[in-house]
Image (tube, rainbow, N blue to C red):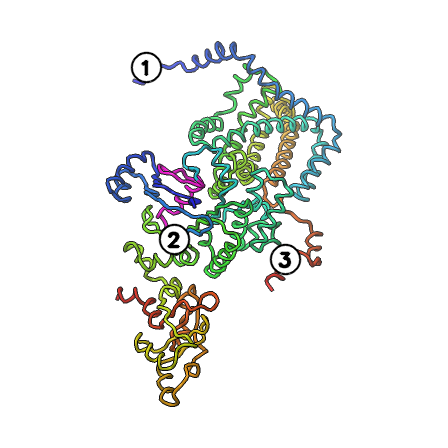
């Protein structure tokens, strides 16, 4: 499948003589050197990425990293110095004003950091703005604006003015305005940065919830790595105008491309990034109908384990421990089913590690159960700790 | 030893010959034709105001004042207009009013578009700014003579002088108002695919309206201050009353005319200032507010339900 949005070698240099700066970049000079020598500001250098349909692509960087410039080149608010920006194969950087307007009206909508709501229009009129621009009639406009407002839970506020709403509500209006024209692509320029931490949290969850039903292609800008890791299907990290790494949350935290990214990810709560999948141990198990206590003990000794899961007709029936079995064999010659612990800890492969902590308490390995109760593997409590800690011991 | 011993510049002669020998003979018909729209508007307005009975004009102005600026200004308008009629200045006041309104109308028609262009182009602004400075600082007596040469004497040349004098504020403030519209709002308008006209009409002009109205108010006040000077080149109205009073040392008559100008100025000032206030758009009546307390299906009620 062709990517929905694709950037190819995008450069943006602010100033009168961008070509000279570009030549200097080619020679390997840094952004700061170029600014000192020529006074030209390198906004974005050689950015390439591809965003697939229906994914949340997060561009993360600190202020001045060029992320806002980059996102504005996706809908042509800023024209790149060189390079191609393709939306469904159409090059935004080199198309007519007419074409660009058409794409903005039908395909790409934007949500802004400081909401950018029109203060002289009501909430309903704000949401309907994109439709009005397209020439949609007043009645239909109103109806579709109402529908968009309902999606963000603000249906009752259509006749209020933006300054009568709280920050979080205003940004919901901004989101509704973006959604009202039913774009395929949503550009979100630090939409939650101006909000209180708690509200930001709510909005992130709500966005994930909305995205589950909308399946838009979302390009989300943020300076907050936690936000990036929470929302992003994939994340691009920018530094000094260049993209230094693109990858999933786990890839970024697990294998940072350079020291800059590593420095960022150092303070990250790794237990929220990694899932049970990342520490999955092999799914060796016994079959209730076939195995006996003796064969179970033999197997555990062979694998060097203290406990092992037992399957019954493909489903996880329970776990047996080495200690229980050896005791029961000594006592009364013994069946496997009697020593079975059915109250075993279990989780899904997508469960984040921090939710596994309480499950580690039982001392048993955690069963990772897939669809129809199938055992996908086990997670040893030590492995969870090792994964969460693996970066701190490097630092120490 | 002075520079003038070496070289004297006959600037006055040059300008005399430029205006008398070139501008006037070649362009007089052109300038005359410029008068046409102004004449039409002025005549229509003047006829209308003078034909309408005093009571009706007063009632309409008081109503406008009430709707825009509130009760106090309406009462003031009523008393002031009755007073003007009592001191025998009513017809002159109507003439002055039609002159001033005509001048302000043309200032708006010329000034707002110029201000919009200046807001969109730094180069145009750079050219425009010194011209506006000159228009605002040059004594109006200087251009009265060429105006008379090009346009003749009478009401319309008076209005043209008034337009020149009163035009700068509305251009400047339109420019300022549009430039001060928040950048991210323009960006938002563009991001949704607005054309330049749509951005201007939907976002820039409404948000600049307050500043533009302040410019209109300034322009109006300047136009009123030109009333007496315009009388020098044949414009009538209250300005003429003051001017003839001055010539005959008739203090009483001059004061009566002057008072008329002041009262009209106050009325128009209050009304145009009120037009620039933003509250206009969403004033809800007391009755509506009271009703909303007792109707269960108000937006506020719904939200609290949602929250609970």
Q: Which chain is mark 2 on?
A: A
**Gap between marks 2 and 3, in whole Å?**
40 Å
**Gap between marks 2 and 1, in whole Å?**
80 Å
Q: Badges 3 and 1: C-beta atoms under 8 Å apart?
A: no
Q: Which chain is mark 1 on?
A: B
- Residue B305 falls left or right of residue A284: right
Residue A113 drawn in magenta: no
Q: Quadrant of residue A280?
A: bottom left
**Gap between marks 3 and 1, in whole Å?**
85 Å
Give the percent coordinates (x, y) of residue B16.
Answer: 46, 13
Q: Where does label 3 land, which residue?
A: B300
Crowd rating for badge 1 (residues with CA inside 10 Å; few <14, some 14–19, many 20+): few
Above or below, comparing residue B83 to residue A151 in the picture: above
- Along the line of sight, the residue nearer the viewer: B138 or B212: B212
Give the quadrant of the N terminus of chain B: top left
Give the percent coordinates (x, y) of residue B106.
Answer: 58, 26
Rendered residue at 42%/29% (across/down): B123
* Helix, strand or loop under label 1: helix
Q: Where does label 1 land, which residue?
A: B5
Q: For marks 2 and 3, give the one nearer the viewer.
A: 2
Residue A77 drawn in magenta: yes
Q: Do marks 3 and 1 share a subunit?
A: yes
Q: Which residues are magenta?
A: A63-88
Q: Badges 2 and 1: C-beta atoms under 8 Å apart?
A: no
């Amino acid at each position: 499948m062709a990517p929905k949005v694709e950037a190819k070698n995008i450069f943006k240099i602010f100033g009168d003589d961008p070509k000279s700066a570009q030549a200097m970049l080619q020679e390997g000079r840094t952004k700061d050197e170029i600014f000192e020598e020529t006074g030209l500001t390198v906004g974005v250098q050689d950015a390439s990425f591809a965003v697939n349909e229906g994914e949340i692509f997060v561009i993360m960087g600190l202020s001045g990293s060029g992320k806002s410039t980059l996102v504005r080149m996706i809908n042509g608010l800023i024209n790149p110095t060189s390079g191609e920006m393709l939306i469904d194969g159409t090059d935004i950087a080199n198309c007519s004003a007419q074409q660009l307007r058409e794409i903005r009206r039908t395909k790409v909508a934007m949500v802004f950091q400081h909401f950018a709501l029109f203060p002289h229009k009501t909430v309903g009129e704000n949401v309907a703005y994109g439709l009005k621009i397209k020439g949609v009639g007043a009645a239909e406009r109103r109806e579709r604006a109402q529908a968009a407002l309902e999606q963000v839970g603000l249906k009752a506020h259509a006749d209020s003015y933006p300054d009568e709403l709280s920050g979080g509500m205003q940004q919901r209006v901004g989101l509704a305005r973006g959604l009202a024209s039913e774009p395929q692509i949503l550009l979100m320029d630090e939409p939650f940065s101006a909000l209180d931490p708690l509200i930001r949290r709510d909005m992130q969850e709500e966005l994930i919830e909305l995205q589950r039903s909308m399946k838009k292609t979302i390009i989300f800008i943020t300076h907050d790595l936690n936000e990036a890791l929470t929302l992003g299907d994939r994340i691009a990290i920018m530094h000094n105008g260049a993209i230094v790494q693109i990858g999933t949350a786990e890839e970024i935290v697990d294998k940072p491309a350079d020291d800059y990214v590593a420095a960022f990810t150092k303070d990250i709560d790794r237990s929220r990034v990694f899932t049970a999948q990342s520490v999955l141990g092999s799914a060796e198990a016994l079959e209730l109908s076939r195995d006996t206590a003796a064969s179970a003990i033999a197997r555990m000794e062979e694998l060097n384990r203290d406990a092992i899961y037992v399957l019954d007709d493909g489903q996880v029936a329970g776990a047996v421990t080495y200690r229980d079995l050896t005791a029961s064999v000594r006592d009364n010659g013994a069946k496997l089913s009697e020593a079975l612990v059915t109250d075993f800890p279990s989780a899904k492969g997508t469960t984040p590690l921090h939710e596994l902590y309480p499950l580690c308490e039982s001392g048993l390995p955690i069963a990772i159960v897939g669809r129809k109760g199938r055992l996908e593997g086990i997670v040893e409590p030590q492995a969870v700790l090792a994964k969460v800690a693996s970066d701190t011991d490097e630092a120490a | 030893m002075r520079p003038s011993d070496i070289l004297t510049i006959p600037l006055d002669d040059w300008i005399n010959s430029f205006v008398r020998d070139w501008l006037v003979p070649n362009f007089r018909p052109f300038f005359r034709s410029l008068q046409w729209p102004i004449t039409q508007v002025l005549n229509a307005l003047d006829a209308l105001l003078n034909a309408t009975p005093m009571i009706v004009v007063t009632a309409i102005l008081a109503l406008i004042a009430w709707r825009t600026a509130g009760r106090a200004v309406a009462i003031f308008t009523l008393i002031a207009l009755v007073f003007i009629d009592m001191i025998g200045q009513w017809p002159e006041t109507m003439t002055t009013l039609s002159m001033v309104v005509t001048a302000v109308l043309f200032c708006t028609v010329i000034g707002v578009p110029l201000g919009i262009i200046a807001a969109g182009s730094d180069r145009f602004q750079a050219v425009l700014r010194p011209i506006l400075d000159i228009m605002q600082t040059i004594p109006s007596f200087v251009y009265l003579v060429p105006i008379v040469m090009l346009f003749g004497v009478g009401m319309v040349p008076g209005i043209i002088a008034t337009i020149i004098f009163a035009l700068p504020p509305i251009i400047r403030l339109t420019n300022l108002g549009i430039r001060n519209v928040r950048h991210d709002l323009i960006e938002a308008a563009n991001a949704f695919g607005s054309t330049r006209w749509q951005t201007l009409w939907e976002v820039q002009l409404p948000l600049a309206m307050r500043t533009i109205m302040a410019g209109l108010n300034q322009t109006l006040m300047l136009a009123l201050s030109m009333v007496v000077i315009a009388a020098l080149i044949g414009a009538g109205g209250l300005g003429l009353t003051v001017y003839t009073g001055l010539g005959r040392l008739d203090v009483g008559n001059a004061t009566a005319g002057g008072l008329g100008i002041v009262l009209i100025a106050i009325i128009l000032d209050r009304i145009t200032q009120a037009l620039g206030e933003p509250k206009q758009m969403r004033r809800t009546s007391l009755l509506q507010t009271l009703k909303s307390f007792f109707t269960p299906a108000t937006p506020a009620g719904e939200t609290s339900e949602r929250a609970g």
